[in-house]
Amino acid sequence: MTTSIVVEGKISVDAVLRSKYREVLTIFYDVAKLQRKKNKKREKALKQTLELANSKGVKIEEVDQNWFEKHAIGKTHGGIAAIVSERIYQKIPELLKSKPGIFFYLDGIEDPYNLGYTIRSLYAAGIDGIVMRQRSWLDVEGIIIKSSAGTSELMPIALVEDLETTTNFFKSKNYTIACTSKDEGQSIYQSSLKPPLFIVIGGEKRGINRNFLDKADLQLNIPYKREFVGSLPLNSVAVIIGFEILRQRKDSNEIY
């Protein structure tokens, strides 16, 4: 049986309509809400979304406020939502079909909001794809889509069983394997972060095991201004490295 997911808000609905990774089953909108607000800009934006849905043959239903009170998670849906299918995640070989890129392995994110924020930032930084350990996000996909400002629907994402097998595959494709280390390695600002590159970022609690650290081609750390023994949150580490990669790409005039 196919599981359906509620996605709410114009940004999220627009994203799933443009996504290659899932099917939009039905769109629901509350025209009365727009009429009450008398917001011409919002009405025009909604019309554009509905036209896009029509062009894709998606079913559209007009509903009242009660539908949103029953199905929406919060109050910021703006009078539009969609029922969508489960996401199709990529296989690792599919990620590497195009030119050599930069991919992040994120290990240890449990909070869907943090995952959404991280995906949004890495997408903005131009990262080519994300790899994560296999798990089900079905119950919180709507949260991930919304907190990522829809970018989770555009970012290629692969789910894998284990890190070692995944790393070996990237190595076989001549990727440099990098990992973050709080106490060792070289500053990201003194490292060449160019493709083909596979970056492994461990969670705050477990980190990356010693055996894997020793096998990595490159160990990276983020220098602190003050003496600080703690670790940065995984999403912060990912964002800092992601935008350092963007800076290096711009400085080298790399086309991406």
Image (tube, grey):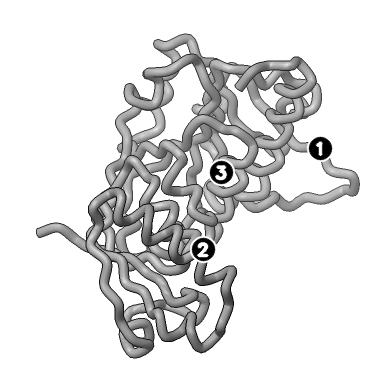
Q: How crowded is mark 2: few (under 14 residues within 10 Å), some or many (20 or more)?
A: few
Q: How many marks?
A: 3
Judged left or right of residue 123, residue 98 is left
Cβ–Cβ under 8 Å for marks 3 and 2: no
Label 2 secondary element: helix
Q: Position of residue 41 (x, y in %)?
A: 59, 69
Q: Which residue matches tag 3?
A: 207
- Between 153 and 96, the residue placed more toward the observer is 153
Earlier in the chain: of badge 3 and badge 2, it is 2
State left or right for residue 60 relative to residue 248: left
Viewer-side residue, 195 vs 65: 65
Q: What residue type is labelled 2?
A: Ala
Residue flagged by tag 3: what amino acid is it?
A: Gly
Name the residue that disc number 1 marks: 223
Query: Looking at the picture, which amino acid does disc 1 mark?
Result: Pro
Q: Check residue 45 in the rendering and tell me which mark sits there, or answer none.
A: 2
Task: Tell me the tag on residue 173.
Answer: none
Query: From mark 1 to mark 2, how far is it between C-alphas?
Result: 44 Å
| Mark nearer the viewer, 3 or 2 | 2
- Residue at the far right in the pictured view: 226
SS of the residue under disc 1: loop
Tell me the quadrant of the picture where the N terminus can be found.
bottom left
